[in-house]
Amino acid sequence: MIRLVLIEDEEVFRLGITTAIQQQPDMEMVANASTGEQGINIVKQWEPDVVLVDIGLPDISGVEVIKQIKIYRSNIKVVVLSCNSSQEIVTAAISSGADSYILKKNNISLILEAIKTTYNNKSLFDSEIIKRGLLSLLQKPKIKGKIFDDHLTEREINVLLLIAAGLSNKEIGQKLFIGENTVKNHARNIYSKLGVDNRINAILKASELGYISNTVTQVS
């Protein structure tokens, strides 16, 4: 049973998501909140498997909520449900620990898929976000001898695969038996070699170059 908490200020959307989840035999909405602060407290009280978070909350940003949840317990999965698809917000959310990012305009079946995918330690990003990230990547000038000539080491590939699986730096360190700062150093080297500056673009570029395959799930 996947236990969920929803942090969402729009009452109609909150009710719709809650109703849909309660109809699933393998999911349970244990609590919901309309503000970020209330949501953080509820997460600490109920310790769910997955938290659904809106970015545009009335008191504090959803990005800050994600950060506080991951500080409290890094193994709690976070799925962002938002109307905002800007690269800056998406990057901020993922940098703060979001495991998946889905736009609210999708139908409920895709949101349920995102919950299950994230619960199973994979990441799911909306196709619009993937396309924007790829466009941003393609528009950046290529650095000669850098993007294509600097091959990733075996350790960097291992780190990259875990990044693509949606794990935090701390979780990656635990799996590979290395320190969190070492993971961060590997990530910086990966970004530099691939010519990118964030996780999404690293995953996209690595997929393009054949380092990873079918690791990140994309909503079509």
Image: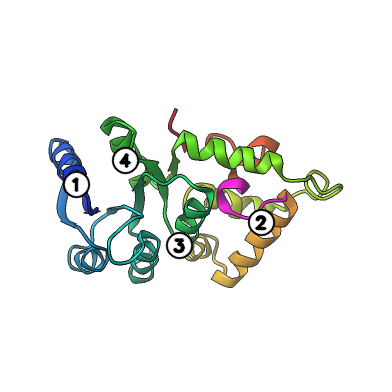
Mark closer to the chain start, 3 or 4: 3
Q: Is residue 111 above or below residue 145?
A: above
Q: CA distance from mark 3 to mark 4?
A: 21 Å
Mark closer to the chain start, 4 or 1: 1
**Image quadrant containing the C terminus:** top left
Mark closer to the chain start, 1 or 3: 1
* Residue 22: quarter of image: top left
Q: Secondary structure at mark 3?
A: loop
Mark closer to the chain start, 2 or 3: 3
Labels 3 and 4 touching (C-beta < 8 A): no
For label 2, the residue is 155
The residue type indicated by label 4 comes to Lys
Residue 215 shows up from this direction: no
For label 4, the residue is 116
Q: Residue at x 53, y 65 (%)?
A: 173
Task: Count neighbours of disc 4 (C-alpha within 10 A) and say few if under 14, some if 14 to 19, many if 20 or more.
Answer: some
For label 1, the residue is 14
**Image quadrant containing the N terminus:** top left
Q: CA distance from mark 2 to mark 3?
A: 24 Å
Count of labels shown? 4
